[in-house]
Amino acid sequence: MTRRGLVLGGGGVLGAAWMVGALTALEDHLDVDARSFEQLVGTSAGSVVGSLLAAGVSVAELRTHQLEGSVDHGRLAGFHWDYEEVTGGDRPPAPRPGFGSPLLLRKGIRELRQLPPMAVLAALLPEGRGRLDSVGALVRHVVGDGWVDRDGLTLVALDYDLGVRVPFGRVDAPQAAAADAVMASCAIPGWYHAVAIDDRRYIDGGTWSSTNIDLMTGLGLDEVYVLAPQASFDLDAPKDFVTRLERQWRARVTAKALRELDVVHAEGTEVTIIGPGREDLEAIGGNLMDVGRRPRVMETSLRTSLAALADPGPAPGAPDLGALGGGAELREVEQAEDAVAAVAARQAEPDADFDAEAEAGAGAGRG
């Protein structure tokens, strides 16, 4: 019997919609029920989808829920979901003043430089005011106050003050209710309030990695399928400035995902990764929280993901990704990340005398 794992990456509201379409295609391609995967790793939006699958919600129910906001049968029956209301719209509320995690910024310079740049940036950003109670209520409606009634579910968050990745559901991770772990995994820094679990503060697991594919190592799996809404192997060339920035970041996420993939593949596990292509990206636009685009994104993903699974081709190596976003553009993103790390390092110096917020903006702007 083939032992399979499923990785569900981050990607906001539209990432979840894209994954539901891709899951429909994956079930058709493999002729299996997605709930039968032995191991599930979910990050951010993927934690919502993954926890619901692990709790017994079918892909068909997820699809109906995306289109109608409620279903009349199955585990989701009786729970109404208004995407516009529960996500707070496609723009974040005004954040709280000050740094989000002064404790993390007090780490030594060497430690900060070893963290993922997004984790450092999250510490510099002010803490968001948005709340994820409705997301927690959705998961709690299906799961209850505890964990899912099966093994193999991992929900990824970041300890906001330690800068440590936390794989909830693993033996060595803190105990948490599934609903709380999902909220923690979805707490986008600067947008949502950090989620407290047993006196620790947690934020979006995507600040460590959008996919966290490497958590599939050591599990003895034959195959791993990765649905990565923020990774793309066929980028478009948008003219809008904000959308161009999103595409540059997407190329960076793709490179990191491929490095993680190599780690799993080195154990002899066959890994297949798919992400949005040009047609999907046109449907997604530049704002992954634009709830009005969900039906089109899901329907497009169903078609394009089926084609991608039918003929996946070899994954490019991370060094070959310059052509995706333009080598110069990808270097700009890397330079911006380095600037963030440098600002955090200076903030960590006890005698530093500078305007951290102003310098962070200038550094990112220089790219």
Image: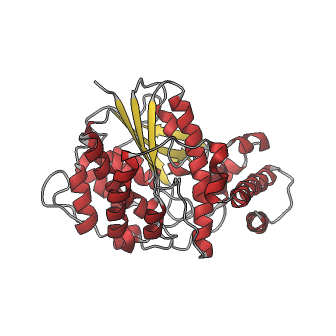
Decide: is 65 above or below 203: below
Residue at the (55%, 46%) spot, across then down: 209
What is the x, y in percent for residue 239? Answer: 60, 75
Decide: is 23 above or below 218: below
Q: Does the image show residue 169?
A: no
Decide: is 243 above or below 303: below
Q: Is residue 136 left or right of residue 333?
A: left
Residue at the (39%, 32%) spot, across then down: 223
Determine the image quadrant of residue 27: top left
Residue at the (62%, 66%) spot, across then down: 245
Determine the image quadrant of residue 329: bottom right
Q: Is residue 27 left or right of residue 121?
A: left
Q: Does the image show residue 22?
A: yes
What is the x, y in percent for residue 262? Answer: 56, 34
Determine the image quadrant of residue 6: top left
- Which residue is the extreme one toward the bottom? 240
Decide: is 76 above or below 152: below
- Which residue is the extreme one toward the left? 73
Residue at the (79%, 53%) spot, across then down: 342
Q: What is the tally of numbered marks visible in this picture?
A: 0
Q: Quadrant of the N terminus?
A: top left
What is the x, y in percent for residue 31? Answer: 24, 41
